[in-house]
């Protein structure tokens, strides 16, 4: 009995020691806090592990610029809110309405942005995923820089391509990855 209490006490001590609140990739905080940097560093030839969605892959900006990633997160947040209208976001009315109509029945509970990359035409694309209670919608968000005269440039939503909704149980993650249904980019 004494060993059980000692083990539980040590476990609780280490849990509280490492349970510092760390911001998560979509705002908010990681449940349970974070691990110390020493445990996150790859060792013995391991690759670093970053947050990942089992359909769109690694989350975050990847090869895209930090400004384009922040802008993509603003667009995704506006679409998830149900109207696609976010202050500072330039979006053609037709494309905004089409994207909102595509996800409106989903009742989005969370969203994810990842896989940023520069396209050959100079635009930047991000993989996006909107998750509801029973279904999810995956797609791509294309952003383009527009000149703003002597003030520099601003970002514009060039296009939003969304797949039809699919059930959350489709393509469940398995450790072997055999039944993963990864998203294929349109272009």
Image (cartoon, helix red, strand yellow):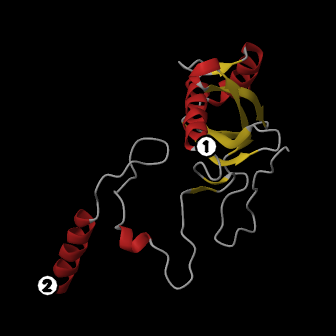
The quadrant the N terminus occupies is bottom left
Residue 144 pos. (x, y %): 72, 31
- Give the CA separation, mark 1 to mark 2: 48 Å
Q: Nearer the N terminus, badge 1 or badge 2? A: 2
Residue depicted at 72% across the width and 13% down the height? 93
Q: Residue furthest right?
A: 187
Quarter assignment of residue 100 = top right
Residue 113 appearing in the image:
yes
Callout 1: SS = strand
Question: What numbered label is drawn on residue 2?
Answer: 2
Callout 2: SS = helix
Residue depicted at 71% across the width and 44% down the height? 167
State if disc 2 and disc 1 touch (CB < 8 Å): no
Q: Is residue 93 above or below residue 160?
A: above
Residue 117 pos. (x, y %): 71, 48
Residue 180 pos. (x, y %): 73, 61
In the picture of the structure, the residue carrying the numbered disc 1 is 113
Residue 132 appearing in the image:
no
Question: What numbered label is drawn on residue 183?
Answer: none
Q: Is residue 109 above or below residue 8?
A: above
Residue depicted at 28% across the width and 56% down the height? 20
Q: Nearer the viewer, residue 25 or 142?
A: 142
Q: Nearer the viewer, residue 110 or 156?
A: 156
10 Å neighbourhood of mark 1: few (<14), some, or many (≥20)?
many
Q: Nearer the viewer, residue 134 or 101?
A: 101
**Which is in the foreground here, disc 1 or disc 2?**
1
Residue depicted at 57% across the width and 82% down the height? 45
Q: Residue furthest top?
A: 93
Q: Is residue 152 above or below residue 137?
A: above
Quarter assignment of residue 5 = bottom left
10 Å neighbourhood of mark 2: few (<14), some, or many (≥20)?
few
Residue 118 pos. (x, y %): 73, 45
């Amino acid at each position: 009995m004494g060993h059980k209490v000692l083990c539980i006490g040590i476990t609780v001590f280490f849990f509280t020691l490492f349970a510092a609140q760390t911001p998560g990739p979509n705002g908010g905080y990681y449940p349970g806090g974070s691990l110390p940097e020493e445990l996150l560093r790859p060792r013995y030839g391991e690759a670093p592990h970053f947050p990942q969605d089992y359909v769109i892959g690694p989350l975050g900006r990847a090869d895209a610029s930090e400004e384009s990633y922040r802008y993509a997160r603003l667009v995704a947040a506006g679409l998830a809110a149900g109207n696609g209208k976010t202050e500072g976001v330039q979006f053609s009315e037709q494309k905004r309405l089409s994207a909102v109509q595509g996800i409106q029945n989903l009742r989005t509970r969370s969203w994810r942005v990842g896989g940023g990359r520069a396209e050959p035409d100079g635009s930047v694309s991000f993989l996006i995923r909107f998750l509801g209670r029973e279904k999810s919608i995956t797609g791509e968000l294309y952003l383009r820089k527009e000149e703003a005269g002597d003030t520099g440039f601003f970002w514009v939503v060039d296009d939003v391509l969304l797949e039809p909704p699919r059930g959350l149980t489709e393509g469940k993650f398995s450790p072997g990855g055999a039944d993963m249904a990864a998203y294929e980019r349109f272009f």
